[in-house]
Amino acid sequence: MKKILEQELVAGIRKNDPAAKETMYRMYRDEFIGWSFKTLNMNDKDRALSLYTDACVSSWSNIVSGKYEFRPGVTFKTYLFSVAANIWRNHLRTESRQPLKTDLENIELPEDSAWQAPDSLLEPVESEDMEEKKRKIVRDVVFNHMTEPCTSIFRYVYYEKLKYRDIARKMSYSTERVVITQASRCRKKLEVALKDRFKESGLL
Amino acid sequence: MKECIIDESTQKMVEDAVREKEALKDDFCRIEAAIRAEERSEAEEVASPVDVPDKVRNSSRVRRMWLILGTVAAAACLACGIFFRVSDVLACMDAGFDISVAELAMTSRGDSHADEIISAMEADDISGARNLITAFRSMPEPVFDLSGEAGQYRFELYKAECQLVDYLDAVLLMREGRPLKARKALRTVAASGGYYASAAEEVLDRLR
């Protein structure tokens, strides 16, 4: 019964159905909080929910872009939680923080058959033209490979279109010069990531 | 020259992807906000099961205030009542003990039930006096031969004794500290127009 529901859910997400967005978010929210407390050693509900939101965003994007395929024996929940685990792992790596109790390489996922990292799902599709291929890679990098503070900076610059001065205030930077420097670093980081992915895909 | 990966079209793709991602994130944040609002309202419902409009709640608050004020007023009245009742009882008892029942014995004609009651009252045997009055009242009324003078005389004696016992009963009620019943008994005696009517009225005046 659950599998059918999940399949329906994934089908709804593929169609970009807004109702599916709410269903997806509500479906595993409470379970995720408990799982993140137990498995990721999180102790802050707000932080856990922030991670869950990021995982939902990534998973949604992966489904819409066709990176995710429903596998028999592996639930969508397992996939969603493994995405969250990867985001958490990247976050800790970025923050140069070693987890005290959690062995990040052996995070226990909710079901026996752990989902592989989302990256491994990306397989080049022959029929796609170069532009579309490029777009998918850009999307994937932006959605799955950008970490803080770059995520926030990109949001403020491209989405909220704030001025550097306002971004500095929001991110508690001393001057807007710091924002410009940080934004430059983020663009460089993005460029490196895109270069690697373009090379992998034969686009360079 | 270093190759620039992020050309204009790629830059556009990046911006589109960022916008798409952040819009998606905002959607999930809105869902989360809605869930939290639901949780809050559920918690509030648990705290106050009946969702009442402000107007009703305000009127309920006013009612509660009046209830508190009423309770305080009732408590004050009760305290005042207790105070007045106590002082009334004490005044009644004082007045009862001020009445010399020994003088009343002279008005009786000796060897009567009233004399026994008076003796008990003189000896401050309140319960004994009460028992005697109860016994007297429970006795069957004697039949007198009113055709002759002797019969009429005994009847008049008995009537006087009954009036005396009624008056003694009122005095005893005063000594027992039962002002309400005592007043009632005194009013009955005063209204009867008997031998002790004027005395009962005097006592009633004192008790007012």
Image (cartoon, helix red, strand yellow):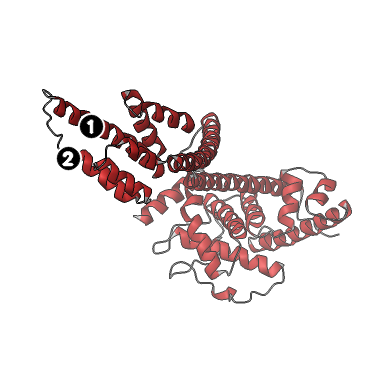
Question: In terms of image quadrants, where is residue B69?
Answer: top right
Total numbered badges shown on the rendered structure: 2
Tell me the subunit letter for badge 2. B
Q: Secondary structure at mark 1?
A: helix
- How crowded pointer 1 is (Cα within 10 Å; few <14, some 14-19, many 20+) is rated as some
Q: Position of residue A163 (x, y in %)?
A: 82, 44
| Quadrant that contains the N terminus of chain B | bottom right
Which amino acid type is marked by label 1?
A: Leu
Q: Nearer the viewer, residue B74 or A93?
A: B74
How far from the left and from the top, in percent, is residue A180?
Answer: 85, 53
Can you tell which quarter of the image residue B117 is in?
top left
Q: Which residue is mark 1?
A: B157
N-terminal of the two: label 2 or label 1? Answer: 2
Residue at the image position 75 percent from the left and 52 percent from the top: A153
Whole-angstrom CA distance, mark 2 to mark 1, is 16 Å
Left/right placement of residue B117 relative to residue B145 reads right
Q: Are marks 2 and 1 on the same chain?
A: yes
The residue lying at 57 percent from left, 69 percent from top is A40
Disc on res. B68: none
Q: Nearer the viewer, mark 2 or mark 1?
A: 1
Q: Is residue B130 above or below residue A29?
A: above
Residue under the point 48% across and 69% down: A114
Tell me the kind of residue under disc 2. Answer: Met
* Residue A81, horizontal then vertical, whole percent: 52, 62
Q: Label 2, secondary structure: give it.
A: loop
Identify the disc placed on residue B139.
2
**Horizontal arrangement in the rendering, residue A22 relative to residue A43 (left or right):** left
